Image (tube, helix red, strand yellow):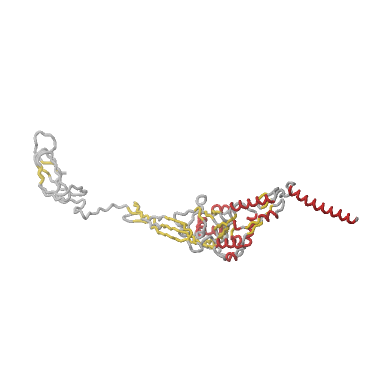
Amino acid sequence: MQSLKLLAALLVCTVFIFGFSQVGTLVTNQWLPHTNSFSESTLIANAEVSNRSKTDALEKVEAAKNSWLSNGTIYLEWAGELQPFPKEAFTFYIPESVELAEDSSHNPLKVELPNGTLLEQIELLSQTSDIFSAMDTEKLKKDLEEVASHLKEGDHTFSFSDYLVDDEVMDQTNLQITLNIAGQTSISELQEVLNGKEIKLRGNEGFSIDTWLENEEMTLSDEAASVLASMLFELIAPTNFGVVERHISKELPTWANEGYEARFQKEKMDFAFTNPNTSEYTITISVNGATITGELNGAPLPFTYEVNQVEMQTLSPKTVIQYSATIPGSGTRVKETGKNGSYVQLVRTATDASGQITETLVYSEDYYAPIQRVELHALTKPVVTTDPTNPNTIGNNNGTNTNPNTNNGTNINTGSNTNIGNTNTNTNTSGTNTNTNNPTGNQDTNTDGTNNNNTGSGNGNANDDDNEEPGTGSGYIGK
């Protein structure tokens, strides 16, 4: 009997303890505040869920995910070309993430990116499947999932070149150009200052010779810097680099190739260009004897670039004649021999993997004016020539020419006058004028002609005046 009482007491105590624990849990979950909420400083991805229940936290994280999907872009980059990555490709496990979230911590979302989707996007951008053997795709996948699991805002770019494990598998950019600088006074200067130097062309940044020399604490003469600028301008021609500032001289220097000159003049003329790619490129300079060489190395370029000369003209000089009293007789002397000018146009084309031209632009269009030939001629009297269409020789008058006579009486002009192209005029103030000649032609001006003048005869005053009675005497001698 006593045993039964003891057993009953034990059963009652057990039921009481179990029931109290269940009721306590119910009361805690339903009636007491904040006991089923996340504590302070709790985040899931970028959503603040402090003092929120799991249900509320679930809704807030879902809203944060939807906002992330519609704002900001993830880019994949290869050889300077950007391609948006579809955020919808990520699979989000939000309920599991909320359930496993720890209080007072920054908890990431559980996210998964299917391998097939990632590989498809990589091949779409690179246009080749060879890249898979050269890339660490698992690391790229992990980095993409990291952005999604924390719902990182803004734009994010992932360059394939950062995940290459075997550069030799992919075609890298390797360009080289050499200029002949034999006979230039700047050879030793270039050798001393530039030999072995490297220029780092960071992604999406510009380069300026003036700034680079200043940052490197180097000094070059304008001629030496112009040689460097011309070499760089020709080196980056078959790339997608953009030229920002460039100048040329009045005459093409002997060390520059046509269409590729770039002149530098401190604080006046600079040479500058930009690297539009996200990848970094390196230019190595070497000066050996009478040559300067530049080598460009880096990641592949978006397309294949080629520069062609589409127009080339040689401009011949004109001859300018000047007269000088120092030249004896009829001699000449060449003051300036003259020099041909030129016009050249270079065009750069970009071709994609399928062979289609995607871009065409004028890379350079240079004009060098010709230097005119100048000749000095002696000062000589111009030679008078005969016009074959006119039978008269200038300055020659054959025959007798009776010039005008002025008489108040009768004036008789006799004789023979042959004067082709001249008009004979006799003027009488009063009286009778008899001209037995048969002159023909028009009145001309004779510079050096010979005039045979006859004395006129007749009654009248020797002087043309107002005498009352007419006198007698000889007329005036024709002038």
Seen as rendered, the residue at the extreme right is: 2
> Which quadrant is home to the N terminus?
bottom right
Q: How many marks?
A: 0
Q: Is residue 286 visible?
A: no
User: On the picture, is 293 further left or further right than 41?
Assistant: left
User: On the picture, is 334 further left or further right than 16?
Assistant: left
The residue depicted at 19 percent of the width and 49 percent of the height is 449
The answer to which of 99 and 418 lies nearer the viewer is 99
Q: Position of residue 70 (x, y in %)?
A: 58, 52
The residue depicted at 57 percent of the width and 62 percent of the height is 120
> Which quadrant is home to the C terminus?
top left
**Up-down relation of residue 374 to residue 171 (above or below):** above
The answer to which of 169 and 197 lies nearer the viewer is 169
Q: Position of residue 157 (x, y in %)?
A: 59, 56
The residue depicted at 12 percent of the width and 41 percent of the height is 475
The answer to which of 233 and 4 lies nearer the viewer is 4
User: On the picture, is 219 further left or further right than 337?
Assistant: right
Seen as rendered, the residue at the extreme top is: 468
Residue 433, located in which quarter of the rendered image?
A: top left
Q: Is residue 426 visible?
A: yes
Seen as rendered, the residue at the extreme front is: 1
Q: Position of residue 29 (x, y in %)?
A: 74, 49
Q: Position of residue 400 (x, y in %)?
A: 14, 49
The answer to which of 184 and 298 lies nearer the viewer is 298
